[in-house]
Image (cartoon, rainbow, N blue to C red):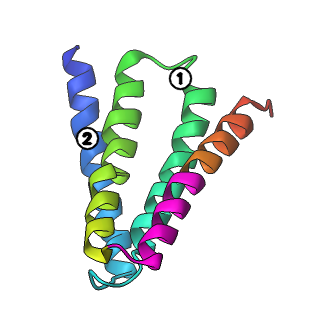
């Protein structure tokens, strides 16, 4: 991996983590409450990555793909946040709903992003 890619991931990571923190601050929740902020972040990130993969990846240089993918979207969306929220919710119906919405919604919005990204303007 080139120094450009490493730098792009670092910059993208700072931006993605900052966006995530801002949304978490705007939509706070207790550990035992439905984690709306995490769900929205992961759904939006899935869609964005779908669009990027379809539209940007075919023409972008490696460093830009790394910065946007692993850096920006990778730190904005995190599987670990989903998992922590599930553990905090315990074995409850709300946890099952959250898991279903997270996985199903993430897959659906990623597919939607891919389709939209493949459309020509």
Label 1 to label 2: alpha-carbon separation: 18 Å
Q: Residues within 10 Å of mark 2 (few under 14, many from 20)?
A: some
Occupied quadrant, residue 89: bottom left
| 54 to the left or right of 36 | right
* Image x and y of residue 4, in percent: 25, 21
**How busy is the neighbourhood of tag 1: few (under 14 within 10 Å), some, or many (20 plus)?**
some
- Check whether the beta carbons of the residues at disc 1 and disc 2 lie within 8 A of each other: no
> Which residue in the protein does label 2 denote?
11
Going 21% across and 38% down the picture, which residue do you hit?
10
93 falls in the magenta region: yes
Residue 99 percent across, percent down from the top left? 46, 62
Q: Which residue corresponds to the image point at 55% horizontal and 29% vertical from the top-left? A: 53
Q: Which of marks 1 and 2 is in front?
A: 1
* Element on which disc 1 rests: loop
Looking at the image, residue 37 lies above or below residue 71: below
Give the image location of residue 102, x and y in percent. Answer: 49, 59
Residue visible at 33% across and 70% down in the picture: 22
Q: Which one is in front, 1 or 107?
A: 107
N-term mark: 1 or 2: 2
Residue at which label 1 appears: 57
Q: For residue 100: magenta?
A: yes
Q: Residue furthest front?
A: 91
In the picture, residue 19 is in which quadrant?
bottom left
Position of the N terminus, as image quadrant, is: top left
- Magenta stretch: dominant SS? helix
Q: Describe residue 30's horizontal placement relative to residue 45 as left or right.
A: left
User: The C terminus appears in which quarter of the rendering?
Assistant: top right
The span picked out in magenta is: 91-105
């Amino acid at each position: 991996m080139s120094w450009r890619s490493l730098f792009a991931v670092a910059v993208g990571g700072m931006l993605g983590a900052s966006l995530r923190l801002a949304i978490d601050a705007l939509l706070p929740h207790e550990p035992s409450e439905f984690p709306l902020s995490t769900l929205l972040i992961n759904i939006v990130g899935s869609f964005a990555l779908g669009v990027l993969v379809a539209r940007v990846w075919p023409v972008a240089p490696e460093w830009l793909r790394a910065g946007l993918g692993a850096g920006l979207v990778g730190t904005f969306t995190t599987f670990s946040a989903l998992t922590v929220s599930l553990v905090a919710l315990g074995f409850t119906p709300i946890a099952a709903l959250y898991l279903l919405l997270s996985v199903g919604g993430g897959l659906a919005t990623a597919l939607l992003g891919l389709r939209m990204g493949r459309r020509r303007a």
